[in-house]
Image: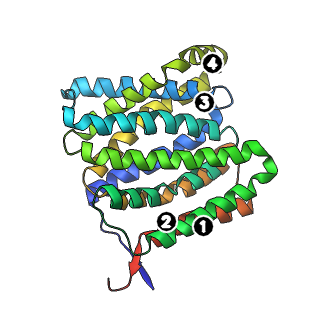
């Protein structure tokens, strides 16, 4: 028998709950807006909306530029999470459904736990490597389940794995930065760095906005204001109050919410084999964060 480690700060848990709900909604909106926006243009639009929102909050609250000691983590998360992750996710969701993308990306908590143990001194859960094997086995099953969709669907799964890796590295880089800067500072400037990295897509964004229906453009703005500005700040707040490994566990609920929302809003449901692979991905995360009873 095993017992999951549930010792998460209540304030951090509340902030993480906000993040989970908003991130789940983003997967569905990205899938819808992706019919009208290219991956890079959508990422730039999202990041610009997020940067403007966060900038206004910074001015209202009187926050200042982060100290030099925080900038390494801000730059890493800005390039990898806010830029590379978002472009890769947008691209992936043009090839696979939102629920499948969410299930594959959610191997991120295992990678966060692994990197947190290696670089943050958080230690390694007793079953971490067993959980990694189960989760990556699940990712293989998801890949096999999408193989009938051709190379494009398989590329979508690979892009999700890359997104998970970018997320994990960024979380581990953010943790030290939060010792020197506030969650709002880290999120605002990380988002701004990401927007700068995506500026080469500015021409595509202008063209896509001109051609897209208003609903799609508003969807992109939504992903910038709530799933980015609000959710990423809430995540950084939670990360400042608990370990990276423990916080990663709180994203268990994202795939289930995404599958439900995808069914309710888009009429999309992953196939049985895909769901099995996704369940293995999540089971691996659960195994990795469990410990023998009495430990």
Residue 39: image tag: 3
Q: Nearer the viewer, residue 157 or 37?
A: 157
Q: Nearer the viewer, residue 28 or 4?
A: 4
Q: Comparing marks 4 and 2, which lies closer to the viewer?
A: 2
Residue linked to disc 1 = 280
Dot placed on the residue nearer the N-terminal end, 3 or 1: 3
Q: Comparing marks 1 and 4, which lies closer to the viewer?
A: 1
Q: Comparing marks 3 and 4, which lies closer to the viewer?
A: 3
Residue 208: image tag: 4
Above or below, 105 against 209 in this view is below
Q: Which quarter shows the N terminus?
A: bottom left
Q: CA distance from mark 4 to mark 2?
A: 38 Å
Query: Could you say whether the residue bearing mark 4 is in a helix, strand or loop?
Result: helix
Query: Could you say whether the residue bearing mark 1 is in a helix, strand or loop?
Result: helix
Dot placed on the residue nearer the N-terminal end, 1 or 4: 4
Q: CA distance from mark 3 to mark 2?
A: 28 Å
Above or below, 37 against 98 in this view is above
Residue positioned 60% across, 30% down in the render: 39
Q: Nearer the viewer, residue 253 or 114?
A: 114
Residue positioned 44% across, 74% down in the render: 127
In the rendering, at what x and y percent does residue 16 appear?
37, 52
Residue linked to disc 2 = 285
* Discs 4, 2 touching: Cβ within 8 Å: no
In the rendering, at what x and y percent does residue 99 appear?
63, 51
Dot placed on the residue nearer the N-terminal end, 3 or 2: 3
Q: CA distance from mark 2 to mark 1?
A: 9 Å
* Discs 1, 4 touching: Cβ within 8 Å: no
Near mark 3 (Cα within 10 A), the count class, few <14, some 14-19 or many ≥20, is many
Residue 29: image tag: none
Above or below, 94 against 145 in this view is above
Near mark 2 (Cα within 10 A), the count class, few <14, some 14-19 or many ≥20, is many
């Amino acid at each position: 028998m095993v017992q999951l480690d549930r010792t998460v700060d209540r304030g951090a848990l509340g902030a993480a709950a906000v993040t989970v709900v908003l991130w789940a909604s983003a997967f569905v909106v990205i899938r819808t807006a992706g019919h009208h926006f290219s991956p890079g243009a959508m990422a730039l639009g999202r990041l610009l909306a997020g940067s403007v929102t966060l900038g206004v909050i910074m001015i209202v609250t009187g926050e200042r530029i982060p100290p030099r000691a925080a900038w390494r983590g801000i730059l890493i998360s800005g390039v990898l999470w806010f830029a590379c992750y978002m472009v890769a996710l947008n691209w992936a969701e043009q090839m696979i459904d939102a629920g499948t993308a969410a299930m594959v990306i959610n191997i991120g908590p295992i990678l966060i736990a692994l990197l947190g143990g290696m670089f943050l001194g958080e230690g390694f859960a007793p079953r971490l490597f067993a959980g990694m094997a189960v989760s990556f086995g699940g990712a293989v099953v998801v890949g096999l389940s999408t193989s009938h969709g051709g190379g494009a669907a398989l590329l979508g799964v690979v892009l999700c794995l890359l997104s998970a890796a970018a997320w994990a590295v960024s979380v581990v880089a953010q943790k030290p930065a939060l010792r020197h800067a506030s969650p709002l500072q880290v999120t605002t400037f990380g988002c701004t760095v990401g927007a700068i990295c995506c500026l080469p897509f500015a021409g595509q964004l202008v063209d896509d906005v001109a051609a897209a229906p208003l609903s799609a453009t508003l969807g992109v703005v939504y992903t910038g204001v709530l799933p980015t500005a609000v959710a990423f700040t809430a995540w950084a707040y939670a990360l400042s109050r608990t370990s990276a490994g423990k916080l990663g566990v709180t994203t268990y609920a994202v795939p289930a919410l995404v599958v439900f929302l995808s069914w309710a809003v888009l009429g999309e449901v992953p196939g049985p084999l895909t769901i099995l692979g996704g369940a293995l991905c999540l089971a691996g995360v659960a195994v990795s964060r469990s410990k023998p009873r009495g430990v």
